Image (cartoon, rainbow, N blue to C red):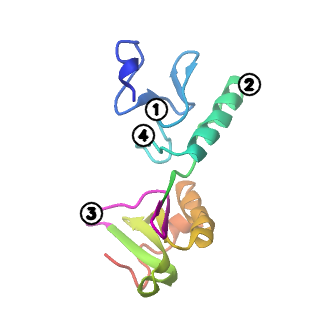
Amino acid sequence: MTGWLHGSGLPVDNGLVRDSRCRAAEGVYAVGDVARWHHQQLGAPPRPENRTNAAEQAMAVAADILGADRAYTPVPYLWTDQYDTKIQIPGAVPAGADAGATVVDGDPATGRFVARCRNAGVVTGVLGWDMPKQARLRRQDVADALAGGPAGSDSPRESGSVP
């Protein structure tokens, strides 16, 4: 999808690379699934490929053009419908030895649950499985953790953690 950008002088690496203000170069902005950006709180350059992200980026770019000079730092979000199952993931579901998940709503045995995901004790994401409203509400846990708030600073492991 970004092949046409090669040779343009703009940085391309798994998408058009942008700074925290969604700028690829001076006076050149990009939004949507073609682009990655420097997320100041995550450190990694996410590339969410959904319409919500594109709309939020467009608003951030407009604000920057109008002088807001504010970093774009949303909670990354993805969703998918797999047959009759609705899966929502605000934030990131980590893998590795320091990762864990705690069911905070519902019950996996019923096929409807929300799990709060952590890496090294810090909330990194939420996995919602057929509980869209509850997953949306838990997105705030990730936002709080990114901002250093309550969800990111409570105990590193909760009872019921799944390593």
x 35%, y 78%: residue = 162
Q: Which residue is mark 4?
A: 45
Q: Quadrant of residue 131?
A: bottom right
Q: CA distance from mark 3 to mark 4?
A: 19 Å
Taking depth in this image into account, of 104 and 20 the one nearest to the observer is 104
Crowd around label 2: few <14 · some 14–19 · many ≥20 (10 Å):
few
In the rendered structure, which disc, 3 or 2, sits on the residue that comes first in sequence?
A: 2
Residue 141 versus residue 52 in the image, above or below = below
Mark earlier in primary sequence (3, 1): 1
Badge 1: few (under 14), some or many (20 or more) residues near its Cα, within 10 Å?
A: some
Q: Which mark is residue 66?
A: 2
Single out the mark in the foreground, 1 or 4: 1
Q: Find the distance from the CA under tag 2 to the CA under tag 1.
A: 23 Å
Residue 129 image position (x, y, % from top left): 48, 72
Q: Are marks 3 and 2 in contact (CB under 8 Å)?
A: no
How many C-alpha atoms fall within 10 Å of the one at disc 3: few (<14), some, or many (≥20)?
Answer: few
The residue type indicated by label 4 comes to Pro
Question: Of the numbered discs in the image, which one, if any, rests on residue 110?
Answer: none
Secondary structure under the numbered disc 1 in the rendered image: loop
Contact? badges 1 and 4 (CB < 8 Å) = no
At 43% across and 27% down in the image, what residue appears? 16
Query: Is residue 94 located in the magenta-colored stretch of the structure?
Result: yes
Picture quarter containing residue 99? bottom left
Disc marking residue 34: 1
What amino acid is at disc 2? Answer: Leu
- Element on which disc 2 rests: loop
Q: Is residue 73 visible?
A: no
Quarter containing the C terminus: bottom left
Mark 3–mark 1 Cα distance, whole angstroms, equals 28 Å
Q: Which residues are magenta?
A: 81-98
List the residue tagged with mark 3. 96
